[in-house]
Amino acid sequence: MHPMSEFEPKIVAFVCNWCTYAGADLAGTSRTQYAPSVRIVRFPCTGRIDFMLLMKAFENGADGIIVSGCHPNDCHYTSGNFHARRRWIIFRSLLDFIGFDTDRITFSWVSAAEGKKWATLVNEVTEHIQAKGPFTDLDKLDFDQLKEQYDETITK
Amino acid sequence: MARIGVFICHCGENISATVDVARVAEEASKMPGVAYAMDYKYMCSDPGQTKIIEAIKEYKLTGIVVGACSPRMHEATFRKAAEKGGINPFLCEIANLREHISWVHPRSEATTKKAIDIVRTIVNKVRQDTPLFPIKVPVTKTALVIGGGIAGIQAALDIANAGHQVIMVEKSPSIGGHMSQLSETFPTLDCSQCILTPRMVEVAQHPNITLHTFAEVESVSGFVGNFDVKVRLKARSVDLSICTGCGACWQKCPSKKIPDEFNAGLSFRTAIYSPFPQAVPNKPVIDRAICTWFQKQKCGHCKKVCPVGAINYDTEDEFIDLKIGAIVTATGFDIKHTDFFPEYGYGEFKDVIDGLQFERLASASGPTNGEIRRPSDGQIPEKIVFLACSGSRDKAKGIEYCSKICCMYTAKHAMLYKHKHHQGNAYIFYMDIRSSGKNYDEFVRRAVEEDDVRYIRGRVSRIYEKNGKLIVKGVDTLMNSEPVEIEADMVVLATAVVANPDAESVAQKMHISYDKHHFFAEAHPKLKPVETNTAGIMLAGACQSAKDIPDAVSQASAAASKIIGLFSTDVMTREPVVAVVNRSMPPMFTTCTGCLLCMEVCPYHAIEREEIKDRTGNVLKIAAKVNAGLCQGCGTCVAFCRNKSIDLQGYTNLQMLSEVMALLNKPF
């Protein structure tokens, strides 16, 4: 394991095309520097984001996740961001219930005019995840034991 | 087997200064599915594009990734190049190396690594790309204009003058709308009917316009370019093709005590009536809710006196089906009436009137022939108090917004009164004066400086009657908030502009959205002010928000020009980024279970319920079906679908999963 100071977190950002992706573009055109830890995946709308993809990302080595789209009422498609927000609230309580560390997922709104906010958001999340350390919760799980438990429950 | 080409752009030095582009290209060439990788100084330049085109041919590429600037910048450029190279343009994707990497990070190992990661994700996405083809939709070049007020009239004339067919549907017996009720208009004080009626006649006589008055839209289905609209022609009981509009019928009608809508209740009309002398069409209609024949099957005077036999009591509502390409919604507004204000007497004081009633009093065609007289006793008032912001900007009354027109028309009312009655006193209680249109502030100044209208900044708490006078109790906030009490002969409330009572049901029929005040919602408050979220349906006038005449006319012309643009081609082309429900042969093997959750969440009503039938017509299965004409490609349905039966072209589940997996170096 890396010592904390050297740990470079892998952060995946799920963003919408119209607001946050454009906001990140604006950060670029204004040359606002931020941590190179983030990898952007572009969606047409936050409403398109299937939250199981967040789990897939964690499963494959992401340490933190950002979900960001248009501010409420600004959605290019009127209501996609509301659907995303609602789904996230429910999904979060599900994750809390199963003991998943929801602190690693940051839900935010960044508009196409908020290049600075995007840079700040990435930096804050990077620092936050750096402080938390790499995501290893899944590695700790004993899948064989889980499978046994599962089989037992099923056969009952 | 995928053969992907990767092209890394230096963007002069914009990318190469911080990203080791040669290494990115080298790493890319090792990625699974990549057949060719290169880097070049300016990929978007002509020689750069030629390199792409040649490489596609030489290496028989099945897809390309361009690592360059934001896709918002040059995606179209590179897709065109891909097409020239002979592959489907949707097999070209952009890795954003400039805005998201080179411009925001210093030259470092981490920056180059990020560039490689991003290129890998996009390569992996392209591996899952499928050729997509623009959707072609035929266009019916007939427009429907709903509402015959000034906005509807303007839109209809503009579209008709461009050579397209227009069908206008107006729910009342005549077109003209609220503008026909106005006396004079600000800021020029020219007579409203003088400028409006020629346009009404033009609508009626225009060879390209079909006018249906006393008609309402019953249902709207279909999509842009191809709407199916059902219109209810309400039973008029008068045959318009025979009636000459002579007026014998309404002169003989015995029901004479019906409050006249056109005169805002200040006079009476008969049960068979033509709404006003300049009505278009100027032919009567029977108000069946009141007519003695329809209530008691007695009377029949009008039928007896009609010289041409145009009256027929047996007509029924008719329905017509229309094929429409685009729709202008110009259904207008309503105002709050005096009964909305308990503090101003619940509408029980006859001499407390609303702005529209004052318009009728001041109008030469009104119940007093343009003399401003008290409704209670017909006396000329010596003192009139005008209250701006009656209801508007008042959260307690549930109307937070500014009604926009009241500051101006209140100034106009006070001026009209002073012009007609020089010795009279006009007071205006106001909160702020909002007069930001062209020549508007000058107009208000004129009221104050030339016509001696007295403005008092403050609100009125109460009005009550005392000895035949109306006592107006207010406050002057510019005079240490001193209480003010005025003994007035008449009070005019500039009541709030509100949405039509049936606005909500109209919006639901059209599948357009509306705000909490039931004003129709534009697609974007700044950049799409006339479009709605339903493609092909435009907004004009005060149905969207409170508007004065110049604004309503501008918006109507804008809506018309949008439609003329739409009608300029026979076939519309749309981006194929739309949702699709998976289909198989036979169709009943679709994985869609028909839960139709997608239908509920779709903001565009683009998803329909489809019955999959066998040859004999038995329903085998219910499934969702996407109307590609309406779908805007947000993908909300995809995230909601319980078993992944619906997918978004260009952002499929497989593509998004591939991207996520590749980000973390686990190609899918």
Image (cartoon, rainbow, N blue to C red):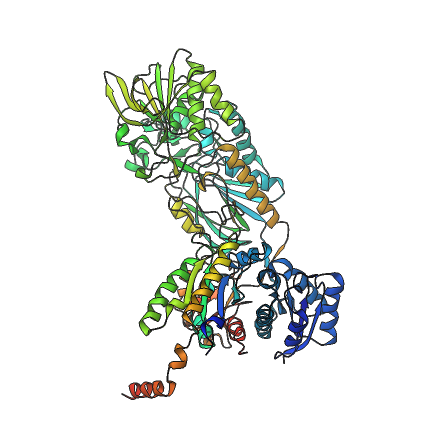
**Position of A70 compared to B18: left or right?**
left
**Position of B638 compared to B289: left or right?**
right
Q: Residue at x 54, y 54 (%)?
A: B224
Residue farthest to the top, as pictured? B423
From the viewer's perspective, is residue B185 above or below residue B422? below
**Closest to the observer: B444 or B353?**
B444
Quadrant for the N terminus of chain B in the image: bottom right
Q: Quadrant of residue A147?
A: bottom left
The percent coordinates of residue A144 (x first, y second) are 37, 88
From the viewer's perspective, is residue B628 above or below residue B26? above
Does residue B3 appear in this view? Answer: no
The percent coordinates of residue A4 (x first, y second) are 45, 72
**Closest to the observer: B365 or B106?**
B106
**Closest to the observer: B93 or B557?**
B93
The percent coordinates of residue B141 (x first, y second) are 59, 49
Label total for image: 0
From the viewer's perspective, is residue B306 above or below residue B559? above
Does residue B118 appear in this view? Answer: yes
Q: Residue at x 50, y 23 (%)?
A: B443
The percent coordinates of residue B538 (x first, y second) are 51, 46
